[in-house]
Image: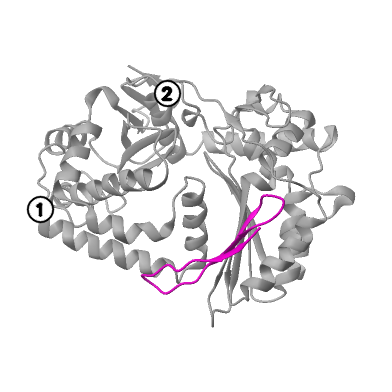
Amino acid sequence: MGRNQTTWEQLGELPVRETLDSGLEVVVLPKSGLKKTYATYATHYGSIDSHFIRPDTGEQVDVPDGIAHFLEHKMYEKPEGRDVFERFAELGAYTNAYTEYTSTTFLFSATSEIPDCLDTLMRLVEEPHFTPENVEKEKGIIEQEIRMYLDMPGDRVRSNLMHALYQKNPVRLDIAGSVESIRTITPENLYVCYNTFYHPSNMVMFVAGDVEPGRIIDHVATVEKARHLAPSGRIGRIFPVEPAEVQKKRVEQIMPVAAPLWLMGYKDLTVGLTGADLLRHDIIRGMMWSLILGPASKLYNDLYQSGLISERFYAHYTSAATYGLSMLGGETPDPEKLEAVLLERLPQEPFKPEDLERLKKKEIGEFVSLFENLEDLAYAFNAFHFRGIDLALIPELLHRITVDDLEQARREHLKESARAVSVVLPPREGGAAHAATSH
């Protein structure tokens, strides 16, 4: 359907992209001289997509929470016991997969046998095999995984914060779902989700390495043509309206930790952005946190010198079209004092033009280095692709950010009504761990 070459001018990179007759977009970035080739096959389908309208029937569908992650696991099981991991190992390749809020990605890295690796990757993603027996078996495996996360303090403090920040948006739910929700998953549920979200029109393949783009695209196109698929209609994704206020102001949980874990979050009330608007929104909020609470900031160093935080303390912003939030925290000996200091100083820390210019140079350097790390590059490409963002826009948007932009973001984002705190505390003397409490 037309092969296009676009230049990421800042670096002279030449990705080649083509949308195949099936609707699949294939993007190949040649990297001459690199020994490793990295490939991803990703679908715009994640844990928050549990309520949707099928494009083939117009039917409105509700499926159990955690089904996207469950489906990712099941794609590795094939008829007659064929082992995809074993096949990749025979080819000298590494494979993995992961599910996030808005996407699911399958990948391999290899130094040779690239066409065979691509064939294996496509078979992995394009040959579903769900039976009552293998679905029931998988429930036990994932239930163990969920229970393991329930015993991990770092996971609990974050999960509790998401439940506190959000009242209705499904981003509040754990990606793997709950023990109760996965027990209700059926093969029929899985096939409905697979046929809806694993259609080529909803997917992208990204390949980077010392490869010839035309040969890669032709190879993938030949395999796709044999599937006899045409582009599908638009998937209707249904999300509840999220209130401005948080669900709970504070959640505390007692767990066996040496020191308290503390997280504070701010729910972003500006949602619905896509493309360049979303990218600019993200960049501004990310730079805001870097200047206020990055390792080079005065506030960070004051907190570190006082012993309130460790070097693992972080502050960052993340978003998609339907949600956005900031999360900051880490281990601290005094959660209440840390919170009090931050609430006093976050609105007051100055944004200095010279600090902003230094940060821009740092961000440009990290952007340039991204193209030398194929794994990070593929991750970034997929994350931006499904949000309608072209990586090439980053340098230009970075240059245009001003101190006024940062001040406006702080005023809009750091609202008390949109703030919540999650704390995991060590057991009291003679006390036992107990479930989360809120107030």
Q: Position of residue 36 (x, y in %)?
A: 58, 74
Image-based side of 197 in relation to 283, left or right: right
Q: Label 1 neighbourhood size at 10 Å, few (<14), some (14-19), many (20+)?
A: few
Helix, strand or loop status at disc 1: loop
In the image, farthest residue toward the front: 2
Q: Amino acid at mark 2?
A: Ala
**Mark positioned earlier in the residue sequence (2 or 1):** 1
Q: Specify whether residue 80 is in view.
A: yes
Image-based side of 285 in relation to 56, left or right: left
Q: Start and end of the magenta stretch?
A: 1-27
Q: Quadrant of residue 2?
A: bottom right
Residue drawn at (54%, 38%), measured in percent from left and top? Answer: 149
Comparing 422 with 106, the one in front is 106
**Residue 167 position (above or below residue 126):** above
Helix, strand or loop status at disc 2: strand
Q: Which mark is residue 183?
A: none
Where's the N terminus, which quadrant?
bottom right
Q: Amino acid at mark 1?
A: Lys
Q: Position of residue 126 (x, y in %)?
A: 76, 50
Residue at label 1? 352
Q: Position of residue 26 (x, y in %)?
A: 62, 59
Residue at label 2? 436
Residue drawn at (24%, 51%), measured in percent from left and top? Answer: 290
Q: Label 2 neighbourhood size at 10 Å, few (<14), some (14-19), many (20+)?
A: some
Where's the C terminus, which quadrant?
top left
Q: Position of residue 109 (x, y in %)?
A: 62, 67
In the image, farthest residue toward the bottom: 33
**Residue 198 position (above or below residue 54):** below
Q: Measure how far apart labels 2 and 1 are at the Cα level.
A: 41 Å
Q: Main secondary structure of the magenta part?
A: loop
Comparing 93 with 13, the one in front is 13
